[in-house]
Image (spheres, rainbow, N blue to C red):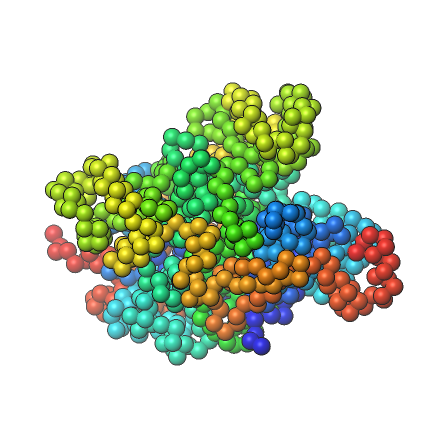
Amino acid sequence: MAPQALEGITVLDLSDRIAGAYCTKLLADCGARVIKVEPPSGDPLRRLGPFPGDAPHPEKGGAFLFLNTNKEGVTLNLGSPTASDLLRRLLSQCQVLVETFPPGYLGSLGLSYAQLQSLHPGLVLTSITSFGQDGPYRDYKAYDLTLQALSGILYVNGEPHLDPVRLPGAQAEFLGGGHAAVATTAAILATEATGMGQNLDCSIMEAAGSILASRYGAFFYKGDVSLRRGNGRGNWAIYPCADGYISLNVYFHGEEWERFKAWVQIPELDDDKFSTAAGRRINVDELETLLLSWFMERDKEELYHDGQRHRVAVGLGSTMEDLQHSRQLAARDYFRTVDHPAAGPLVYPGPPFKLGATPHRTGRAPLLGEHNETVYLRELGLAPQELVRLREAGIV
Amino acid sequence: MYEHPLRACAVTGRGGLPLEGVRILDLTQMLAGPYATRLLADLGAEMIKIESRQRYDLTRGPVGGDRVSRAYPNDDPGEHPWNRSHFFNELNRNKLGITLSLTHPRGVELFKALVRASDAVIENFSARVMQNLGLSYQVLREVKPQIVMCSMPALGMTGPEKDYVCYGTTMEMLSGMTELMGYSDGVPMMTGLTYGDTVAGTHAAFAVVAALRHRRRTGEGQYIDLSQLETITQYLGPHILEYSMQRRQPARLGNRHPTMAPHGIYPTREEERWVSVAVGNDAEWQALGRAMGKPELADDPRYATLGERYQRQNEIDPIIAAWTAPQSAYQVQETLQQSGVAAGVVATMETACTQDPHLAARDYFQTVTHPEAGTHLAPSAPWKLEGYRLPIRKPAPLLGEDNQWVLGDILGLTLAELRELEEAGVVGALPAELAAAPKP
């Protein structure tokens, strides 16, 4: 078997939201051993859709299945007094702890970072929360919408004359998880080199805001407040076509415009009024009308490939079905069919990048408590009757 | 010997930054790559950004300045606009900057010498560029077998569409994001974010650190082939599984949610200011009703269950909007949060940077003094380490600012050799366009 990049690292995953699950998914898919601890009633993510036939089932939720590939699953009722002993024993086998509890909760279990440090000096503790471990919003309630709003990534989308519109899905959560994985892996590298633990406070609001990148500079340099630009205009816009939508990104100056004209061969575009960038900008309404009627006679697949053959940046507005038929993604073997004992075989996005020497793992998400016996009996050395007792007490 | 431009900076008093001692060559330009390398530079890597006088990072803007698409301090491009662009300066802090012409044989030679002295190389050119420069992974691996190299072109290094021309919108379209995005009764929409770039950048940063970890353990380098498209589709994972399960296209929902209600943004008394409200369960709905001074809403059987509320969103939204409209956005946020309802201002750059009490309290903004752009605030990396902010140790480099340190100290070139290189146009601190112009 090929080696894996994060082989030999064990992560205790106490997270119960998308940001935490995506962070540990990145680690698990790259070879870290992730032990996911769920309450006996199951991770709340198991209650998120989509479900086959829209029928909720704790083993068949699409979000859970996708976010927990290659992890092991155990159950533990953290609120029970015996749980903290088990948790400490589990932790002694781990290098990393990822958690998404409200700030202070870990401390209430006797596992604050200071306590963890004396227990386990080389531990990387990654805490991912909506707003971070301190500050006035620390205990505020937030859903993805709240975090998209407060981070500033919501305001910039949509038509200038309409309300702003959010990004689809749980994008703030994903952004929080992706950023947390970068810092966690860097912390692992440092800990392996120095033996010293690291404590990361990851704020999802800040991670989402972070992608606004240059807009902060525009504000601080000259007070620019980005306005919503809708779907663009003229040469830089989304257009409908015969069977869907395409995007067009052509610079008005330079040879891109010439390549564009050579592709579409619309005679009216040879008119003098379109011969300069300024002219094309002034006559943008007329330009759009010409392009629209040309695009409406063609379908998106044809426009995408023909445009690209002329080296014009045309994009195809993919539906989920189109994605499955993308010959580029197929040639790169992107989608993976992953079988699961309850949910059956489903098509998942494969790894987000290809590591030449250390390929990703392609396992499935765990069933609820699937690894209780392996972890509690074989690794922690509990006696079988102890596990039965814990089960009966509702702890496992 | 010169003083190291990235002065050592202990964050916690007990240790340095996590990636201290890691040296990375950064050939990236624009947004996706520089975002990746900024995350790594913030975490302590010694990031050497390589531009050339002939082709510097486009985010520096044109030699003569461009006040439409670039923001300059006080709207003044100054004498060297390429050193004062907001876009470049924001994305490239904590990096060293050198100029090196990779189309010149001596430039290629020096680049290879730098590869020998580095741990990783990141580039985001189109798929064929490094090959054409004679600097593909196969070549770099011979120069230094343990090198980690990450290429992050739009659609990956293989496949029939690898050479397609893509901008941010193109990738959003291809990923399926656009079809899902927009008003519920409207057309598919692009984001206002060039979303794919930063999502790809985050994954590239993660991939490089993971590969560095493997290298530290085994001594083995490797190549990372990252398709920006394939990273955006990760964030649509649940939608992709929905299609796999149901063979249906998930609905375009605007600001609504597949299961929560109410879930939207509402007007306030300020122009262009909205506040978001999301209600996830019955308890929160009752809390919302009470906080609005409308206990009758909380008790109304027509809205008692999530199913009922979901069906009646068109009735509920105007009731909430009528309540928020005469108030300020922060006032609504505060009132509802005190009652345990998830409400948040729809922040603009202005509110985030100047009014948000939380970002201020968490020291999110740091002061950066740039030699040509002056002193401004800039956002920190989105994590605290040991309770501290990762410091902005150095402003973005001027064009060719660190040539002497990098080529002199790392590669051991003498000042005379550097001068020779400058005369040959291989390095330098002025854009080629200017240096070539006849002197007045």
Does residue B118 appear anywhere in the picture? yes
Residue at the spot 43% in from the left edge and 54% down from the top edge:
A322
Q: Of B48 and A8, which appears nearest the observer?
A: A8
Q: Residue furthest bottom?
A: B142
Position of B63 compared to A40: left or right?
A: left
Position of B306 compared to A258: left or right?
A: right
Percent position of residue B173, x then y: 39, 50
Q: Of B188 and B74, which appears nearest the observer?
A: B188
Residue at the spot 39% in from the left edge and 67% down from the top edge:
B158
Residue at the spot 54% in from the left edge and 28% down from the top edge:
B314
Snapshot quadrant of residue A198 = bottom right
Percent position of residue B350, x then y: 44, 34
Position of A284 compared to A32: left or right?
A: left
Q: Is residue A248 above or below residue B338?
A: below
Residue at the spot 48% in from the left edge and 41% down from the top edge:
B252
Q: Is residue B406 above or below residue B355?
A: below
Percent position of residue B281, x then y: 66, 36
Q: Of B7 and A352, which appears nearest the observer?
A: A352
Snapshot quadrant of residue B420 = bottom left
| Quarter of the figure that contains the N terminus of chain B | bottom left
Percent position of residue B312, x then y: 58, 29
